[in-house]
Image (cartoon, grey):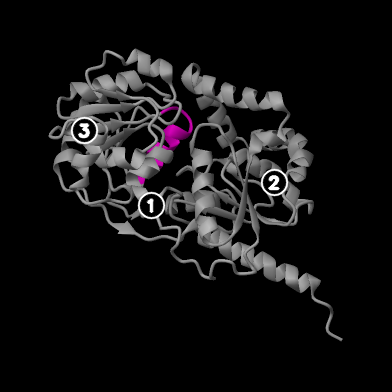
Amino acid sequence: MTGGIRAPSRDAIVAPTDARADRGDPVGHPDRGRVLVVSADIGAGHDAAAAELADRLAAHGIMVERLNFFAALPRPLHSVFREGYRAMLRWLPWSYDALFTITDRSPLAVRAIRTALRLASRRMLLRLPPGTSLVVTTFPFANQVLGPLRHRGRLDASVVTYVTDFVVHPTWMAPGIDTYCVIHRAAQRHAAAHGAHDVRVVSPLVSARFASSPSDDKRAARARFGLPEQERLALIVAGSWGVGDVVRTAAEVLATGCVTPVVVCGRNDELRRRLHAFPGHVLGWVDDMPTLMRAVDVVVENAGGLTCQQSLAAGLPTVTYRPIPGHGRANAEVLAEAGLTTYVTTAAHLRPALTALTTAQNDAPVVAATDMAAVVSEAVRRSARATRRRNDPPVP
């Protein structure tokens, strides 16, 4: 790190792949079975990845059902998990950081979580649709239930997981998971170091609508959100919950004088109220992020999650600033080392970073990667072939 900035090394950014590309077999092929996608409504990233995958698989002619992981827990625990996590991020960030660090360093802590979640095993099995040939997870705790079920022979369907972060935390790892899909080579190395055998690098599960569009779309995009035509705009994002030191970040971005902040508060109405007198542009929940990203010149993010993946897919220069504890800081390090974002660690270096990113040509090389839907399709075909072999009568 030099002068408070981790600058991109111009490593390749994985481009989103259109759902119809690389289909392999035609739609309606008899080998296309039923897939269950297990996510969780904790934040927006896990569910958004599941929804995008479901859309791509539907284009492959695969029957898809989705399940909220928390449906396998007793009803009160759903709110306890979700609201407890939200409270830690918003009010007690040090506690989340401590939990993330402990589970990162202690295999015993991960095993304790796995043991506790065994209580959900029977309920999870009861929620598997008949004829399920493959289960895909986008939430780490789902791995801690489904992996052991497969490992113990109680689940016949293969289990594939899509890691929604650039960092593969040990809570994603569980015995019985057949394949791990990650979104960068650095994450592939992390998963292998944790003992995973089959790790695939895939393109992020973000909509193809985020792909770069002609520059003349910027004027229409700005008009759509009532943004000024001529100013350089910095989009400040903090996830669907609007967590982190967003107010301070907005003030410091404004103070640079080189960009005008556009702050997205997500579903955090309290944050939006706190910013009601802010001289930049303040938005609540945005349904059309692809268009908003076409309107701005740079993105400032704090978690390395879904919105960061969207900005990279859109080809926008992206700054990581004041990352949230736990996975936010871990992702910030990986993103900077991979050359995907500029990690600014001090307010004094925010202006030079934003100035450089909004005035220079920032065409990072883009490479294609495997479509996650293609990985799932192949796994479904393997499962169908294995089932046919088991059911074929013996040759006399």
What's the residue type where badge 1 is placed? Ala
Q: Is residue 111 magenta?
A: no
Name the quadrant of the N terminus: top left
Q: Which mark is residue 313?
A: none
Cα separation, mark 1 vs mark 2, equals 30 Å
The reply to whether residue 29 is in sight is: yes
Q: Which callout, 2 or 3, points at the residue further toward the start of the chain? A: 2
Closer to the eye: label 1 or 3: 1
Label 3 sits on a secondary structure element that is: strand
Judged by depth in the image, the label closer to the viewer, 1 or 2, is 1
Give the percent coordinates (x, y) of residue 128.
72, 47
Report if residue 332 lies within the magenta region: yes
Q: Which residue is mark 3?
A: 233
Say if residue 4 shows up in the picture: no
Vertical order, 348 against 13 (above or below): above
Q: Toward the viewer: 378 or 227?
A: 227
Q: Which residue occupies the foreground of this view, 116 or 222?
A: 222
Marks 1/3: CA distance?
23 Å
The percent position of residue 15, horizontal first and vertical second, equals 36, 55
Q: Secondary structure at mark 2?
A: helix
* Residue 344 sits in quarter: top left
Q: Residue at x 24, y 39 (%)?
A: 221
Task: Indicate which label's residue lies in the foreground, 2 or 3.
Answer: 3
Q: Residue at x 35, y 13 (%)?
A: 274
Q: Earlier in the sequence, mark 1 or mark 3?
A: 1
Label 2, residues with CA under 10 Å away: few <14, some 14-19, many ≥20: many
Residue under label 1: 208
Image location (x, y in percent) of residue 19: 45, 58
Percent x, y of residue 381: 63, 67
Furthest residue toward right: 396
